[in-house]
Amino acid sequence: MTFVEMLKISIAMPILLILSLAIFAQALERLYSFWFAQKMPTGMWERVRDRLESGDKAGAIAIARRDTSLMGEAIARLLALETANTEKLVEAFQLYRQRLSLGLNRRVGLFGTASFISPLIGLMGTVLGIMRAFHDLSAAGAGGPAVVAAGISEALVATAFGIGLAVVAALFYNYFTLTARHRLNTADLWVLEIAQLLEDHGRQPVP
């Protein structure tokens, strides 16, 4: 069966094809965003932590301000607070946390939706294909089980395609949601570490 013949099985096949293209395009966009555009600045954080551990708050602020990421902006803002107890830092970080969450979870819901509807679309294609097979059989007025089996086997391709697409979409959804959750937890941990380091080494006036 050629690719063109697969698309002609039922109306569900073109729909599944378009959905699959949307899934893979969105997956590529999210991968780029996660690992390049919104990558966690681990190196910057390690340098900031080293400065705070040595009591050099001004140096830590300077390092954070040179970083162009959202977390760099957030850390610089938190370190510049005059009263920086744990509660104040966590409260001030909520705006940046929401921005980070929005960026990480952008259009991730497409994968969850696709994993749910793809098998249903494939099943609909199979049902329509079987209906067409029986209709063609009755219109021809001839044939037997072999003819019906051929039509049904072609119709089942839609279900198989839908299930396969659902599996891929579910894998993408779990990967991106779990990675986003891990990064948000990492950001929360950084804020708590900042609060602890500031309490341990005292606070210096912001230059």
Image (cartoon, helix red, strand yellow):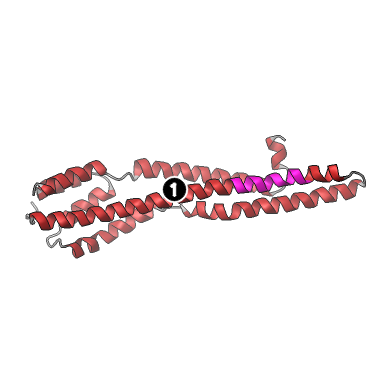
Residue 46, image x and y in percent?
20, 44
Residue hosting label 1? 175
Q: Residues within 10 Å of mark 1 (few under 14, many from 20)?
A: few
Who's the residue at 85% across and 47% down the image? 136
Q: Amino acid at mark 1?
A: Tyr
Would residue 188 be counted in the magenta stretch? no
Name the magenta segment's main secondary structure. Answer: helix
Q: Residue furthest right?
A: 141
Residue 52, image x and y in percent?
13, 49
Residue 33, image x and y in percent?
39, 44
Q: Quadrant of residue 43?
A: top left
Is 195 placed left or right of 99 in the picture? left
Residue 9, image x and y in percent?
73, 44
Element at badge 1? Answer: helix
Is 23 placed left or right of 44 in the picture? right
Would residue 159 be counted in the magenta stretch? yes
Who's the residue at 14% across and 44% down the image? 50
How many numbered dots are placed on residues in this image?
1
Who's the residue at 46% across and 51% down the image? 174
- The residue range painted magenta reads 152-164
Residue 82 against residue 158 in the figure, above or below: below
Q: Residue furthest front?
A: 145
Who's the residue at 20% across and 65% down the image? 87
